[in-house]
């Protein structure tokens, strides 16, 4: 059964450097790293010490607030470094990989007979849990809460994002296993959204409510889909997963092995041969970046897509949740009279002597210049044109800025994640940091009321 | 040049004068600022470009205003030309000369004083100079009489920028439209310079009482006194009538409006609903007159019987609707609210000008009034969204937390 959703508001950002649909195997990385910033709100407690050996899939640390929630190593090897920041906060864990990988094999639960609690315990113990995120607050799911529904978006509309249909090919078995396991943990439905005319593997998966969606970005963001299908109310919880994480979770449930392998799209105008690479979570990005080659010396390397990704560098590592790595030019240069001359080579949501509206299909080579300075909110009515959620974006942002908890709640902060505001941030004339504002608002709300 | 300025910027970084330097620097070069958090790429538009677009839309009005200043001046002396020809009588050097000597100083004083205060506040408060005044500075000379003394304008601008904007926190924070605050200040502080039949024509005030006295009453001014006006409909539409500097040409304002709507800079919702509001109020008045409820000797008779749609052509209503009511900071911020906000601006403008002949240019009062009410309108619009969410909340499926169950079991067994 499928239902069609049509998104009208939004904006497709077409960039040059989309990944060609061929998969190469990346060179094996020497060091793998887990970046703790990927696990927002988790305070880690180490389970092993620096210099100790660890198997792939063996817990590295647990969540201070929930001792059962383990975070496992993507590879076997020696924990060579614990990078710490201010007040000894752990930033990164680095594992020097063994030549021969050996995996920790967990005893798998029987998916047909096991109940929700057994599966929950298994996922928490074996490192599969962090793949599940929850709304409200857009953090790793609280195992104690029961979700009213689970959402998976198998449609990527973000600029240069990996194509789910391509990376999920032949993974039906793993996906089905993960869906079966998830369905035991919720009394509600599992909503999966795919592109309207897609040959997605989800077409053959049982136990899901399949939705077909069409329209510009952010149609592919799970927040947009939740808002259309079954919005989050105060007190409710929904879980969200990315389809590639479903595959990993499925393999963990079928074989008992935490297999950190993942197909990653390397994209962006700076990359000479943008294409897909098979690598592992935490691998050095340089292991595949230079295989494709770069056109410039100085560029912005991003873990994720250009709208929501995290800034990294050539010595950085692939993020825990990312299946896209983007490289675009840095824009730290001045432009003579850049504010008033006609603009042909940049995307704009207006027609104020900007001409991207003439060629909506054209692909652009955007750099990281902000194209203007940070200002107070002045213009109104612009965000609404690219924001399909039934929420007042400007008012919600302002509520977060002034830390008005009541208003944040009433205006629907429970329903959103920072990524839902990535497009409004892109078009923002005042160059305000929308995602950061929303993140801080969510953190505050969770601290005060969660 | 680029490198030198970059070095200078680094040198001044963190210094007191940095905002002033940066303001000039960013005027020349779009800054080298790159994204740090969130979206790594950004769209091409910034506040400067937005403001610049509005100014572009205002330029035709300004140029027309310059010619019209001369045209009204010479017409008041020599009488209006018969067989009017655009190139022989309007677009002439003589007219332009009058315009450039009267209007240009207004523009210079408006920008000079306003920007000086903006820079001062930026330096004192240590924030960047924001672009808000770029449009205000252009609007102000266009909405005042041509002979407004410069010192008066300077005081009004200082008042408007400081009290109307900076005390609220600067661009983006103000409640009242700064340009209209300046206009209102002039109107109430120096009423003799802002109304009557002398002020709309260059040298009208100077020559008052002499043998060479000239005058030019606005259409609304004539109507308010119950007398007729000497202008044809096409005069009103093209703008060959006395009035504030840049507000007379409905045609050019219309072109500006189309440009602003097309470029998506100004809200078409406000413009459309304001026009509808003005027409509605005009129709009501016409209806009262047609129904014969109003005796002909009533002092409102002539204004009320003024054809409803012609209200849009006179008294700066069109200018106010297109360039003032659409100010995003002081207007309604929700799309739904913009409909109400615009409608009442049009509605009240016509009401004020008819019922209070002392304020023929009531549009500025209507906009200021609605500026004050805009947050209230938004409040109710947003509340609609909140109510919807609360209604949904009633059917929420909230499952108890695992730990809650344990607690309740404990209490049961205990």
Image (cartoon, coloured by chain):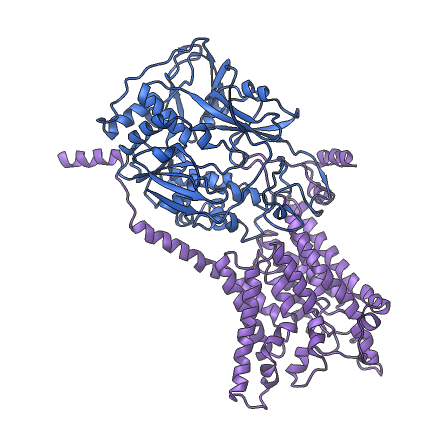
Chain colours: A blue, B purple
On the rendered structure, is A289 left or right of B202?
Answer: left
On the rendered structure, is B42 left or right of A261?
Answer: right
Question: Is residue B158 positioned above or below B14 on the image?
Answer: below
Residue closer to the observer: A304 or B403: A304
Q: Quadrant of the N terminus of chain B?
A: top right
Residue B199, position as x, y percentages in the image: 74, 74
Quadrant of residue A107 in the image? top left
Residue B99, position as x, y percentages in the image: 80, 66
Residue B41, position as x, y percentages in the image: 59, 37
Residue A329, position as x, y percentages in the image: 63, 31
Count of numbered tags: 0
Q: Residue at 34% across / 33% down in the picture?
A: A204
Residue closer to the observer: B94 or B195: B94
Residue closer to the observer: A353 or A209: A209
Q: Residue at 35% across / 18% down in the picture?
A: A257
Q: Quadrant of the C terminus of chain B?
A: top left
Q: Residue at 33% across / 51% down in the picture?
A: B392
């Amino acid at each position: 059964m499928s239902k069609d959703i049509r998104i009208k508001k939004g904006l497709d950002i077409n960039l040059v450097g989309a990944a060609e649909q061929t998969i190469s195997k990346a060179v094996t990385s020497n060091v793998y790293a887990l970046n703790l910033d990927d696990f927002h709100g988790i305070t880690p407690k180490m389970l092993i010490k620096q210099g100790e050996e660890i198997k792939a899939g063996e817990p590295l640390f647990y969540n201070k607030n929930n001792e059962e929630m383990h975070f496992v190593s993507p590879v076997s090897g020696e924990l060579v470094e614990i990078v710490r920041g201010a007040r000894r906060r752990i930033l990164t864990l680095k594992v020097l990989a063994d030549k021969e990988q050996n995996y920790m094999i967990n005893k798998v639960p029987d998916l047909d007979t096991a109940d929700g609690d057994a599966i929950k315990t298994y996922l928490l113990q074996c490192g599969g849990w962090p793949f599940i995120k929850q709304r409200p607050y857009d953090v790793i799911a609280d195992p104690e809460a029961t979700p009213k529904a689970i959402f998976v978006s198998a449609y990527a509309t973000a600029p240069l994002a990996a194509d789910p249909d391509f990376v999920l090919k032949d993974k039906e078995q793993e996906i089905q296993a993960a869906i079966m396991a998830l369905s035991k943990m919720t009394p509600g439905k599992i909503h999966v959204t795919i592109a309207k005319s897609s040959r997605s593997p989800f077409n053959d998966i049982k136990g899901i409510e399949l939705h077909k969606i069409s329209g510009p970005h952010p149609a592919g963001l799970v927040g947009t889909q939740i808002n259309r299908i079954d919005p989050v109310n105060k007190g409710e919880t929904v879980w969200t997963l990315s389809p590639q994480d479903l595959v990993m979770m499925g393999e963990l449930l079928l074989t008992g092995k935490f297999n950190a392998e993942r197909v990653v799209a390397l994209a962006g105008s700076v990359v000479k041969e943008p294409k897909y690479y098979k690598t592992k979570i935490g691998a050095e990005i340089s292991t595949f970046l230079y295989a494709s080659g770069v056109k410039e010396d100085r560029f912005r390397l991003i873990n994720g897509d250009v709208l929501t990704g995290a800034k990294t560098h050539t010595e950085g590592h692939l993020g825990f949740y990312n299946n896209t790595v983007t490289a675009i030019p840095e824009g730290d240069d001045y432009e003579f009279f850049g504010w008033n001359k006609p603009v042909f080579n940049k995307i704009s949501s207006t027609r104020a002597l900007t001409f991207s509206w003439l060629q909506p299909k054209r692909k652009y080579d955007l750099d990281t210049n902000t194209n203007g300075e940070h200002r107070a909110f002045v213009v109104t009515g612009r965000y609404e044109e690219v924001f399909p959620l039934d929420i007042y974006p400007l008012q919600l942002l302002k509520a977060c800025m002034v830390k008005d908890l009541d208003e944040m709640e009433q205006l629907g902060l429970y329903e959103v994640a920072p990524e839902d505001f990535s497009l409004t941030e892109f078009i923002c004339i005042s160059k305000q940091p929308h995602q950061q504002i929303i993140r801080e608002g969510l953190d505050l709300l969770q601290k005060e009321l969660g | 040049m680029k490198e030198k300025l970059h070095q200078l910027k680094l040198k001044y970084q963190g210094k007191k004068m940095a905002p002033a330097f940066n303001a000039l620097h960013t005027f020349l070069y779009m800054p080298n600022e790159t994204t740090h958090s969130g979206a790594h790429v950004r769209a091409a538009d910034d506040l400067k470009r937005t403001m610049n677009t509005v100014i572009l839309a205002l330029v035709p009005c300004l140029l027309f205003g310059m010619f019209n200043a001369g045209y009204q001046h010479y017409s008041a002396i020599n009488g209006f030309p018969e067989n009017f020809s655009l190139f022989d009588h309007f677009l002439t050097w003589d007219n332009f000369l009058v315009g450039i000597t009267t209007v240009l100083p207004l523009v210079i004083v408006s920008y000079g004083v306003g920007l000086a205060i903006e820079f001062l506040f930026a330096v004192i408060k240590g924030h960047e100079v924001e672009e808000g005044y770029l449009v205000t500075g252009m609007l102000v000379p266009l909405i005042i009489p041509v002979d407004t003394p410069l010192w008066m304008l300077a005081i009004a601008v200082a008042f408007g920028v400081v009290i109307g904007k900076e005390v609220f926190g600067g661009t983006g924070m103000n409640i009242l439209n700064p340009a209209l605050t300046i206009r209102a200040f002039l109107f109430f502080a120096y009423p003799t310079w802002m109304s009557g039949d002398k002020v709309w024509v260059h040298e009208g005030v100077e020559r008052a009482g002499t043998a060479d006295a000239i005058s030019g009453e606005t259409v609304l001014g004539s109507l308010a006194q119950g007398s007729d006006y000497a202008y044809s409909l096409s005069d009103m539409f093209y703008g060959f009538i006395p009035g504030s500097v840049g507000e007379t040409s409905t045609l050019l304002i219309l072109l500006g409006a189309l440009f602003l709507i097309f470029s998506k800079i100004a809200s078409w919702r406000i413009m459309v609903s304001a026009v509808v509001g003005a027409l509605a109020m005009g129709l009501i008045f016409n209806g009262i007159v047609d129904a014969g409820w109003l005796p002909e000797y009533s002092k409102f008779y002539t204004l009320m019987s003024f054809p409803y749609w012609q209200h849009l052509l006179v008294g700066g209503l069109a200018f106010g609707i297109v360039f003032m009511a659409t100010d995003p900071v002081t207007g309604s911020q929700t799309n739904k609210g913009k409909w109400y906000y615009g409608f009442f601006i049009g509605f009240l403008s016509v009401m004020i000008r008819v019922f209070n002949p002392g304020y023929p240019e009531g549009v500025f009062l209507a906009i200021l009034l609605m500026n004050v009410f805009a947050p209230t309108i938004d409040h109710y619009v947003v509340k609609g969204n909140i109510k919807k969410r609360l209604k949904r909340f009633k059917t929420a499926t909230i499952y108890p937390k695992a730990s809650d169950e344990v607690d309740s079991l404990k209490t049961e067994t205990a």
